[in-house]
Amino acid sequence: MQVNTFAKIISYLFHPLLLPTMGLLLIFHLDEAGLWIPSPGIQLIILALTFSVTFLLPLLNALFLLKIKMISSLAMETRQERKLPYLASAVFYFTESYFLMNADVPVLVKALMFGATLLVAGVLLINLFWKISAHMVGIGGLCGMMIAVSYRLQINLHLIFILLFLIAGLSGFARLKLGAHNPAQVYAGFLLGVFVQLILFL
């Protein structure tokens, strides 16, 4: 397998729009005393809603923009091309966050979605003058969330940390290898994701 092909696969597998759903899967697999985890049926509904709103709708929007030639490719390589997709994603994320804030779901779920919404809005604003790595913002957010959860609940999540930081390293390598970002954009994206979710959860 060529290195560029591997980098593309990593970028697709850990696309930032998929990470809220992955974050929910991590939360739902926490089994700690005093932490309310909804029934499997409710979990499935929340997962389906999150996947639809944070991935499918932004994807359909991007495909529509591609069809009407508002963007040249789904990679959206320039800051200008990313403005409308990011704005639409921010609206979708805010809508689900608002819904979850008023629903009877675990506070960790609410915090995850609210943090993801803040990060999307942050990426949208930063993109107006600088191209930051959304991939690294997303995986950084997951890392920050799980660090905070481990600290607040005093639980050992070392294996999850190893997995997430491995994914972060592979994602950073992939974005650099594909020429999508420079090192500063990769590091800044990761740190932004970590600190926003870390501060929010703590």
Image (spheres, rainbow, N blue to C red):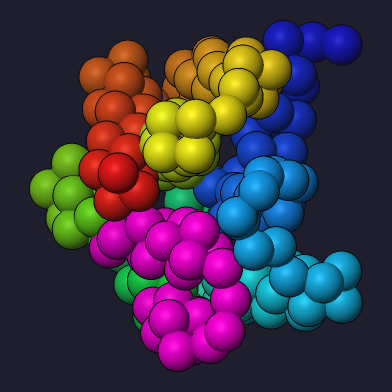
User: Can you see residue 50?
Assistant: yes
Q: Quadrant of the N terminus?
A: top right
- Is 22 drawn above or below residue 97 in the view shown? above
User: Can you see residue 81?
Assistant: no
Q: Write the residue at 73% across / 45% down.
A: 31
Magenta part of the chain? 94-121
Q: Quadrant of residue 53?
A: bottom right
Q: Quadrant of residue 40?
A: bottom right
Q: Which of the pair 165/122 is nearer the observer?
A: 165
Q: Quadrant of the C terminus?
A: top left
- Residue 4 percent across, percent down from the top left: 69, 17
Q: Which of the pair 57/81 is nearer the observer?
A: 57
Q: Write the residue at 76% across / 22% down.
A: 5
Q: How many marks?
A: 0
- Residue 129 percent across, percent down from the top left: 12, 48
- Is 11 drawn above or below residue 92 in the view shown? above
